[in-house]
Amino acid sequence: MSVLEMPTTRIGPSATAAASHTTHTTHTSNAANAANRANSYGAEIIELFAVPEPVPRRPRPLGYLLVALGLAMIPWLFVLATSLPATAQASHWSTAWVGLDALEAIGLIGTGLLLRRRDARRGPAAAATAMLLVVDAWFDVTTAAPGADIASAIGMAVCAELPLAALCVVLAVRASAPH
């Protein structure tokens, strides 16, 4: 049964007045007669309709493409794991780390400002910032030299980067939840 075929339920000022005027009509005739009924009752009539079930959407091709690309990366991971050298020298090492930390700072500032304004864009900003923080923790720990460097990297990951990432994930999930 569609919404247009469902009988309406009327709420009026009294049961006897409503019973004398109650009819089961479609949505189109209800709109035309609403002013007449309101005048005869002396009050506004509120009509209640059942909410229709959502229509299932057809799958989006882009979703299939992204899944296929993600699956195609799995063999590539094995190639990288077996062919990359154990060590490498980067000519712009400090630029890479300063750039990553700058993006994290921009993400935290942007997420904070959007959160203060209750802007809906805070969710995507928080999600992106969380990912940057997790990536920073990962690369800090995996590229640190043994000894004090690895201890410092683990300490930063456990005490700063990962808790901030978790906070950003919570903010992103709450922002995407229906209100």
Image (cartoon, rainbow, N blue to C red):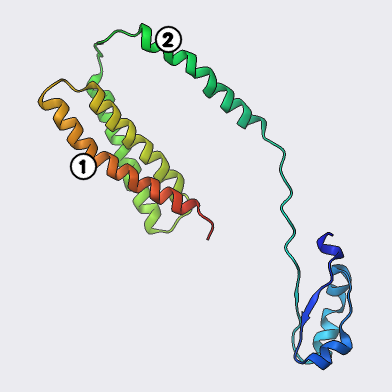
Amino acid type at mark 2: Val
Q: Residue at x 49, y 18 (%)?
A: 73
Sequence-earlier tag: 1 or 2: 2
Q: Is residue 163 left or right of residue 170?
A: left
| Residue 34 to residue 2: above or below | below
Q: Quadrant of residue 162?
A: top left
* Residue type indicated by callout 1: Cys
Residue 117 rendering spot, x and y as whole percentages: 41, 58
Position of residue 170 relative to residue 34, above or below, is: above
What residue appears at the point 52 percent right and 61 percent down from the top-left corner?
179
Q: Nearer the viewer, residue 158 or 129?
A: 158
Quote the CA–CA distance across marks 1 and 2: 34 Å
Checking the image for residue 159, the label placed there is: 1
Residue at 30%, 7% (x, y): give it: 85
Residue at 28% in and 44% down = 163
Quarter of the image with the N terminus in it: bottom right
- Residue under pointer 2: 79
Coordinates of residue 131 in the picture (x, y in percent) = 38, 36
Q: Quadrant of residue 153?
A: top left
Mark 1 Cα-neighbour bin, 10 Å: few <14, some 14–19, many ≥20: few
Among the 4 quarters of the image, the one containing residue 67: top right
Q: Where does the image place residue 37, in percent across and percent down from the top left?
A: 84, 85
Name the spot of residue 135 as percent of width and height, x first: 33, 31
Q: State the SS at label 1.
A: helix
What number is the disc on residue 144? none
